Amino acid sequence: MIEKQTNVNMLGKEDFEISTKITSNNIPLLEENYIERMNSCNGFTKDRHFQKVASIPYVAILRAEQEGYDMNNEKDVLKFLAANPEFTTANYYVTPGSNSHKIIIK
């Protein structure tokens, strides 16, 4: 569940300030991530064509971007996951091109 609260404050006759607060209940997602991390084949599908390494809620992405992470950059996402392992669904990430190169997330 996501709650959004927007306020408009007048600063003068023609000036105003808009502020928004977004709140989200992430507990169900964090519990699901924990279960996936503990019970999965390290995030891989049965045919091993896909590896799910994280499930990050929208509000956490917004917070990460405010903290300076570029969530469109793979290296920044991995740095974010290293700092916030509760969003991971795998213990490590297999780099593309070789199964022998692993980046440990936590």
Image (cartoon, rainbow, N blue to C red):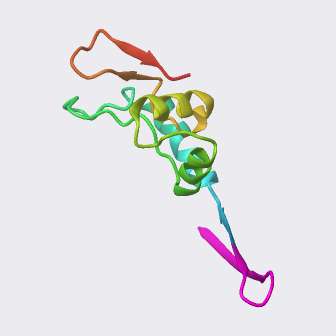
Please say if 40 is above or below 22: above
Front in this rendered view, residue 95 or 6: 6
Left or right? Give the position of 61 relative to 95: right
- Residue 16 lies within the magenta run: yes
Rendered location of residue 40, percent (x, y): 40, 31
Residue at image point 32% right, 33% down:
51
Q: In which quarter of the image is the N terminus?
A: bottom right
Q: Residue furthest top?
A: 100
Q: In this view, does 22 lie above or below 64?
A: below
The image shows residue 58, relative to residue 99, as above or below, that is: below
* Residue depicted at 71% across the width and 88% down the height: 14
Quick check: 39 left or right of 3? left
Quadrant of the rendered image containing residue 52: top left
**Relative image position of residue 42 (x, y in whole percent):** 39, 26
Q: Which residue lies furthest to the bottom in this view?
A: 13
In this rendering, is residue 36 above or below 106? Answer: below
Residue 93: percent from the left, percent from the top?
A: 39, 24
User: Count the marks: how many?
Assistant: 0
> Magenta part mainly helix, strand or loop?
strand
Range shown magenta: 1-18
Q: Residue at x 43, y 17 (%)?
A: 103
Q: Is 5 part of what is drawn in magenta?
A: yes
- Residue 100 lies in quadrant: top left
Q: Tell me the quarter of the picture where residue 53 sits.
A: top left
Pick the residue in front: 61 or 27.
Answer: 61
Does residue 2 appear left or right of residue 104 in this picture?
A: right
On-image quarter of the C terminus: top right
